[in-house]
Image: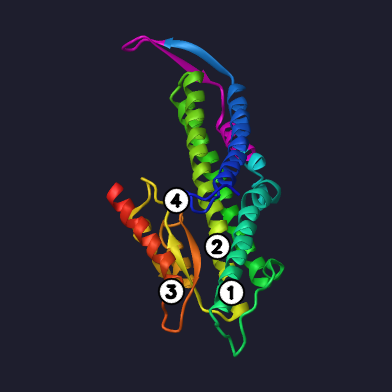
Amino acid sequence: MAKKTKQDPTGQRVNRAKAAKSIVVRLDAAEKRVKSLFRIIPKQRRSEKPIVNKTIFDYDITAQQREYLEQEIKRALDEELETEQDRRPFSWWYESSLELPFRQGTVEEIVQFNQLVQGAIIAGALVNGMPPRKFPTEIVLQSQPYLQALNSVYVEGYADIKGLSNKTSALVFQQINNGLSSKLAPREISEKIAQRFRVARSDAKRIAVTEVNKAYNDARLEASNIAANETGLRAGVIHISALMPTTRDDHANRHGNAYTVEDQREWWNTGANRINCHCTTETVLIDNQGRVVQKEKQEALKDERKFFDKAS
């Protein structure tokens, strides 16, 4: 995992880049196939002079052939992205792009939670009359809540790739169909295809940022819940914003504030808060009065927020 920074508190830069590249490579292959389909359409060049000299192209393609072209474009996207017949692309998308950051987030959370347990033991904290106990990562990785949360990541991640496939194939065909009807030059139609795939690549990068960071953060929240239940300690999370020029105000305003796991998850799942979000959380212990035990850490984060406000 890449080194964490104030601008990338998840440390998922490498995983995001790999995820985006894996989608873009497949979109590149689909674009080549689509352009090949377009090039084989019979055409004839001629001049038209009603007002000004203009070269137009007559395309010899029937309504039935246009329908076939639409189906073939969809097939190209589905096969390259492995979304045909709702088949989830486990090998290239889940295992590399989603399961890896999910596992990293889980392991990292348990390691850090065990450090909190150690601090609680030193401070003399008792749970049911006994000091809290650390627990191995394997307990979480094999637990039913972990596996259920991972499956949710799979389902949502697939929906994004399937949506990208459907949207791109539909809009690419629309561009080609409009170009054929307008008798545009092949070069112009080919450029419109390229433009649409450039938009798809931009969408792919957004999906990669959103889904990789979501997998990492969801894993941390789930592991924090499991760890709290296993140890009996009360825990919450501090929101850590990615303090970048593009950080949204409502994201930056949460920096250093403490929330329950449920509140944090609900906020992330509201509106577009997940989209392109680089924020993360850090688990902290809560005392009997509902206050953050690691108050020095919280105050340091709030000071970062003040500095960020001045710099902005």
Q: Nearer the viewer, mark 4 or mark 1?
A: 1
Residue 117 got which mark?
Answer: 1
Q: Secondary structure at mark 1?
A: helix
**Residue 282, percent from left and from top:** 50, 64
Q: Nearer the viewer, residue 13 or 267?
A: 13
Residue 263 got which mark?
Answer: none
Q: Secondary structure at mark 4?
A: loop
In this figure, which residue is indicated by the disc labeled 4? 6
**Which numbered disc flags the more N-terminal residue, 4 or 1?**
4
Q: Amino acid at mark 4?
A: Lys
Residue 189 visible at all: yes
Q: Is residue 269 above or below residue 235?
A: above
| Disc 3 from disc 2: Cα separation | 21 Å
| Disc 1 from disc 2: Cα separation | 21 Å
Q: Amino acid at mark 3?
A: Val
Residue 165 lies in quadrant: top right
In this figure, which residue is indicated by the disc labeled 2? 218
In this figure, which residue is indicated by the disc labeled 3? 292
Residue 154 visible at all: no
Crowd class of label 4 (few under 14; some 14 to 19; many from 20; radius 10 Å):
some
Span shown in magenta: 48-76
**Which numbered disc flags the more N-terminal residue, 3 or 2?**
2
Q: Is residue 243 above or below residue 143?
A: above
| Disc 4 from disc 2: Cα separation | 20 Å
